[in-house]
């Protein structure tokens, strides 16, 4: 493994990117106060004006932020920027994502359920020869076809085993970020076991050694995003920026000055997590200032979303929802989300209509004046009028997932599913007010915020333990009346259960086989210069490499 010191010299960035942020940690960089910057922007005014009916689109996807972990949901964590943007926009209070990283990202990029891409099971692992299927048209590809300049900053986590899987091969003009699901926030290294460690920071399709100054990733990604805004002319071409933060995924790392705000939280995990959220909040503040400074804001749509529920073991909180990340209880799939834009018709409202992460594909493509071909076979709906004008949502159901290779419920059977469905299989479906779960939905306790707990969560102190549903393999809830999933109605309404099991079976007929290959040892970074990156070479790449080598020898 190549050594990578944490205390690298931090050279100041070019002047056009030096809109310094609250999260900057270099001792040599000063921080401009928000008040001074706001005053400067007010005096300057916008440098550019609107010129196109196509809005600029900023999609901010954060990692593992729990449902409670935003100020406007009652958190003790201070998020003034997120609170203000949400308050002035539209809060999505019936908004769903997937319970894990890769599934949510795949559905955002394609507008299709996991059962239709083969990514039904778990996440894409670093050593797996797997990625978002190449035959799927992506959101940036559609926006690029509509004339957008497309850029991605942050976490990809949709596979990279061959070059064709990389973000710049999937519709993005530029990419700066990480390919894996997690890593060190400063060194940008990631280990998969003791013998597979490597560097994971990319500029385009190459390791970003020269661009890396050892910055905290929340800072670094925000700086890059602002640099993109600074170097693009909003009057000439619409811009799509996908900003996928690593925060607030584990490991729990944060600049020390953010911890000072949360000295009153004795639980070290919750304290660090809270500090990470505060740093993220300031980063969004700076991004918003840059949008105004460079003339984007008045014609911009900002979408903010978490990729899944919070992980209480790592300081997150979904209280009062049940369950956590990696589960199909509400705590794993009901997300923090809002839309902020001067283009919204009904600002300062809450949208309680059913919305799912697959809906962003058709919504944003239509908003960007792109085309939606019938052969896309989308599972998402255009919900812009629902969000902006408060009209009824075209969505009435959500297939949360069907995972045929997940752990089977011991007591599940076709009999328990009335001969319509094998309830041993993990599945979850929402239709109207009703939600059905089968199989093993995952960790199912209700976990209050661990603010005052000074011990590891593994002790499960102060948790509400679920004892009455052991041996069960089917649940039914009225989520509108019982959002906390406390009253199982499967015995009371068997006719509803049967209808939903039939719907599950119908969905399952459209599913493609699960793609979850075994680890490929050739993925080890030690075979790739100490860097995580593509290792599978197709015939064309091998031919091009051979031709290049032959030409070099002749010269």
Image (cartoon, rainbow, N blue to C red):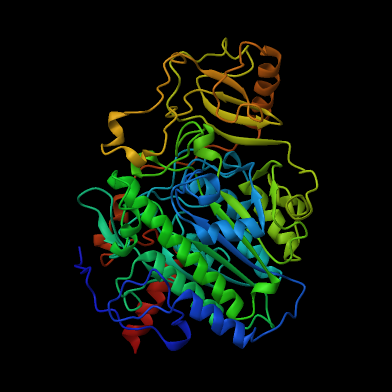
Q: Using residue 236 as the reference point, say whether residue 67 is left or right of it.
A: left
Rendered-image quadrant of the C terminus: bottom left
Q: Is 247 in front, or is 400?
A: 247
Nearest the viewer among 36 and 109 is 36
Name the residue rendered at 58%, 60% in the picture: 84
Q: Nearer the viewer, residue 104 or 51?
A: 51
Residue 72 placement (x, y as % from top left): 55, 49
13 lies above or below 181: below
Q: Where is residue 6 in the image (x, y as percent from the top left)?
A: 23, 68
Relative image position of residue 25 (x, y in whole percent): 32, 71
Q: Which residue is drawn at 61% across and 42% down?
A: 116
Q: Give the percent coordinates (x, y) of residue 319.
A: 48, 36
**Where 381 falls versus 494 (above or below)?**
below
Q: In this view, does 203 lie to the left or right of 263?
A: right
Quadrant of the image occupied by residue 506: top right
Q: In this rendering, is residue 249 above or below 220?
A: above
Q: Quadrant of residue 353?
A: top right
Judge left or right: residue 263 versus residue 516: left
Q: Can residue 232 be seen in this view?
A: no
Q: In this view, does 299 lie above or below 348?
A: below
Tag count in the figure? 0
Q: Is residue 463 visible?
A: yes
Instruction: Locate the N terminus and report the quarter of the image it occupies.
Output: bottom left
């Amino acid at each position: 493994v190549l050594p990578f010191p944490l205390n690298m010299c931090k050279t100041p960035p070019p002047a056009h990117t030096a809109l310094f942020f609250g999260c900057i940690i270099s001792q040599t960089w000063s921080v401009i106060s928000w008040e001074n910057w706001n005053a400067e922007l007010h005096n300057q005014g916008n440098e550019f004006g609107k010129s196109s009916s196509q809005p600029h689109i900023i999609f901010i996807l954060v990692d593992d932020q729990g449902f409670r972990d935003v100020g406007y949901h009652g958190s003790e964590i201070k998020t003034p920027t997120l609170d203000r943007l949400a308050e002035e926009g539209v809060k999505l209070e019936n908004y769903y994502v997937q319970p894990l990283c890769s599934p949510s990202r795949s559905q955002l990029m394609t507008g299709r359920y996991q059962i239709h891409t083969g990514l039904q099971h778990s996440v894409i692992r670093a050593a797996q020869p797997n990625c978002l299927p190449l035959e799927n048209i992506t959101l940036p590809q559609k926006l690029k076809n509509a004339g957008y300049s497309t850029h991605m900053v942050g976490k990809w986590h949709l596979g990279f085993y061959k070059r064709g899987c990389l973000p710049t091969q999937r519709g993005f003009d530029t990419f700066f970020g990480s390919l894996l699901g997690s890593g060190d926030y400063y060194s940008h290294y990631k280990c998969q076991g003791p013998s597979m460690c490597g560097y994971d920071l990319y500029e385009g399709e190459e390791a970003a050694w020269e661009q890396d100054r050892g910055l905290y990733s929340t800072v670094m990604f925000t700086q890059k995003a602002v640099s993109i805004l600074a170097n693009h002319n909003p009057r000439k071409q619409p811009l799509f920026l996908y900003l996928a933060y690593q925060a607030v995924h584990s490991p729990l790392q944060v600049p020390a000055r953010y911890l000072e705000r949360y000295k009153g939280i004795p639980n070290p995990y919750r304290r660090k997590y809270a500090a990470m959220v505060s740093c993220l909040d300031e980063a969004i503040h700076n991004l918003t200032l840059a949008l105004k400074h460079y003339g984007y804001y008045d014609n911009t749509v900002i979408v903010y979303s978490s990729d899944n529920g919070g992980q209480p073991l790592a300081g997150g909180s979904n209280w009062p929802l049940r369950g956590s990340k990696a589960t199909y209880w509400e705590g794993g799939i009901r997300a923090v989300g809002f839309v902020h834009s001067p283009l919204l018709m009904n600002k300062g409202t809450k949208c309680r209509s059913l919305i799912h992460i697959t809906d962003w594909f058709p919504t944003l493509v239509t908003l960007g004046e792109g085309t939606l071909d019938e052969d896309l076979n989308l599972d998402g709906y255009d919900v812009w009028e629902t969000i902006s004008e408060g009209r009824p949502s075209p969505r009435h159901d959500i297939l949360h997932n069907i995972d045929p290779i997940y752990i089977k419920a011991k007591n599940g059977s076709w009999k328990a599913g009335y001969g319509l469905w094998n309830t041993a299989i993990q599945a979850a479906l929402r239709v109207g007010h009703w939600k059905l779960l089968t199989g093993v939905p995952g960790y199912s306790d209700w976990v209050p915020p661990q603010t005052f707990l000074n011990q590891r969560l593994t002790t499960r102190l102060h948790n509400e333990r679920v004892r009455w549903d052991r041996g069960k393999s089917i649940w039914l809830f009225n989520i509108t009346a019982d959002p906390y999933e406390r009253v199982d109605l499967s015995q009371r309404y068997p006719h509803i259960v049967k209808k939903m099991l039939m719907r599950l079976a119908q969905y399952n007929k459209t599913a493609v086989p699960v793609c979850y290959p075994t680890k490929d040892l050739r993925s080890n970074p030690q075979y790739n210069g100490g860097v995580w990156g593509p290792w599978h070479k197709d015939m064309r790449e091998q031919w091009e490499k051979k031709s290049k080598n032959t030409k070099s020898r002749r010269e």
